[in-house]
Image: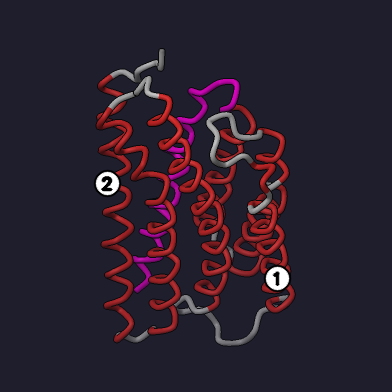
Amino acid sequence: MAKQKPLGMRIGETVFCAGYLLFAVVAGIIFLLARSGAHPGYASMCAAMTLLLGAGDAFHLVPRILANVHGETNDPAEQKRRAFWLGLGNLVSSITMTIFYLLLFEAMLRVPGAAETERIGQNFVRVLLAALAVIRVVLCLFPQNNWFSREGNPMWGIIRNVPFVAMGIVTVLYLLIWYQEWQLALLVALSFACYMGVVLYAHEKPMMGMLMIPKTICYICLIANLLGRL
């Protein structure tokens, strides 16, 4: 028999997920409206990355919200259907999260108040991030990931995240060395630490999945930080 989550946990998770998605939509709209301001390139890049992040996360958060609303089921057909949509959502969000960091890099090149001159290694970092992103997306598309089964494939969960973690390390170093953006660098580092905690340990210890909450909070704080620069 499928184990039911406590009602309080289901309500809390649903409210948090819905609030996060609403925040992403509102922030994205604000960035879009700001394109007519003094920094249209920065606003456009931030709008694209924020709306992409929210749309990608919606693919796996909406099925979770619906599962929380309806509760667990013992119907094999329904379990299979839910596993498919959750798996598809995780696949889509894995790809959009990867593209998010490419757009974040481009947004930082256009941040208001930044020097107009090209930073040392800028093009090299751009190419490196793009190459790592392509590798990550290709690995995500391998059938060995078992996206559409509840068990998944823990080993492939690690494999496909190696280039993603490399993207995170490059992003953090770039933020620190060329921008001295300690707060943004810390938020990116913490989000990756929480995410990898889930990847490495949630399969055997499901409660580790709760690390997705501080990970999401890091994204909210990061986007709020960028909003404050408009």
Q: Is residue 113 left or right of residue 73?
A: right
Relative to 75, is 194 above or below?
below
Residue drawn where x is 49% and y is 30% of the image: 209
* Earlier sequence position, callout 1 versus callout 2: 2
Residue nearer the viewer, 123 or 137:
137
Relative to 186, is 26 above or below?
below
Give the class, few, some or many, for how many residues have Cα within 10 Å of label 1's Cα (few <14, many ≥20). Answer: some
Cα distance, mark 1 to mark 2? 34 Å
Residue nearer the viewer, 40 or 4:
4
Give x and y (percent) for residue 62.
34, 45
Mark in the foreground, 1 or 2: 2
Is 227 colored magenta in this rendering? Answer: yes
Q: Which amino acid, by three-letter code, is at mark 2?
A: Gly
Q: Which residue is situated farthest in the front direction here? A: 77
Q: Which mark is residue 227?
A: none
Give x and y (percent) for residue 213.
42, 37
Is 121 colored magenta in this rendering? Answer: no
Quarter containing the C terminus: bottom left
Residue nearer the viewer, 6 or 228:
6
What residue does disc 1 label? 125
Give x and y (percent) for residue 98.
57, 58
Residue drawn where x is 60% and y is 21% of the image: 204
Q: Is residue 17 left or right of residue 188?
A: left
Residue drawn where x is 68% and y is 58% of the image: 138
Relative to 221, is 65 above or below?
above
Secondary structure under tag 1 reads helix
What residue does disc 2 label? 19
Give x and y (percent) for residue 90.
50, 46
Q: Which amino acid, by three-letter code, is at mark 1?
A: Val
Secondary structure under tag 2 reads helix
Which residues lie in the magenta part? 202-230
